Image (cartoon, rainbow, N blue to C red):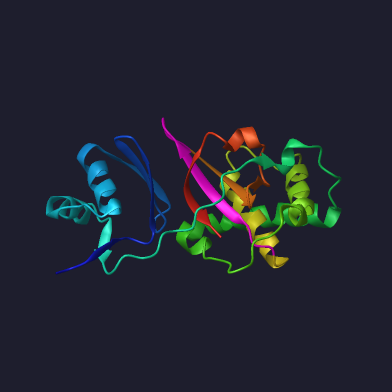
Amino acid sequence: MQSYRLRADVQHCQFGAQTVCLDLSTSRYFLLEGAASDHLAQFVSGTADNEAISCLLALGLLEAGTRASAAPIADTPTRSLLDHRQPKASLRLLYRSIREQRRAQNALLSMSLGALLEPTGLPRADPESCGAVAAAFAHASRYRDATDQCLVRGLAMRAILARYGLGVDLVIGVTLPFAAHCWIQAGPVVLSDAFDRVRNFRPLLTAQ
């Protein structure tokens, strides 16, 4: 009997009878409703029948193979470094944060999210060890428009911290009516946004 698994580049988050999905290969969100959303929930829970599997195959959400282990999930955020006054950022880190955001913005034009979010394999960082980089990105918003740039900021911050050997979680969260937001966490501590900015989003993807 043929076995199937959810495509590795499809992330999903269910809201009642609706499911928000993100295709990392095309960097596009889409919404499943009604029977399609139910079929996906059944497949994830291991109760999908032939009708459900046929529907998901037709939608291109399944591929042949055995089921992979569960995707990593970031800790539930409890606070943010940015909820307190930030120390003065070093000019070197400030310049690097602006330069890395430009690089991330250009990369998004030519690369998929799946390619940009390859695991770093780094050990989880202590939040306080990320404070100088977080402060630099907070101050960089004075010199670079941060409107609708959460993904660019998240990719850039993750990349800089990785160069220092600091592993963090890049989280993409969603809400309905549809909105998406990206932020960086070290454990339960948010590094790139105020706590109130992220608390109402439900995590859709965690990239370590």
Q: Position of residue 167 (x, y in %)?
A: 64, 62
Q: Residue at x 73, y 66 (%)?
A: 164
Point out residue 28 in the picture as x, y percentages from the top left corner. 40, 49
- What span is in magenta? 166-179
| Quadrant assignment for the N terminus | bottom left
Asked if residue 95 is among those painted magenta in the image, a careful observer would answer no
Residue 149 lies, with reference to residue 73, above or below; the image says above
Position of residue 139 relative to residue 11, above or below, is above
Answer above or below: position of 199 versus 30.
above
Q: Residue at x 83, y 57 (%)?
A: 92
Q: Is residue 195 visible?
A: yes
- Residue at 48% over, 64% down: 115
Q: Is residue 94 left or right of residue 25?
A: right
Question: How many numbered marks, from 0 up?
Answer: 0
Viewer-proximal residue, 166 or 47? 47
Provide residue 65's location: percent of width, then percent of height.
Answer: 27, 69
Which residue sits furthest top?
Answer: 177
- 81 or 45: nearer the viewer: 45
Give the side of residue 193 with respect to residue 204, left or right: right
Quarter containing the C terminus: bottom right
Measured as percent of width and height from the top left, residue 31 is found at: 33, 41
Residue toward you, 109 or 9: 9
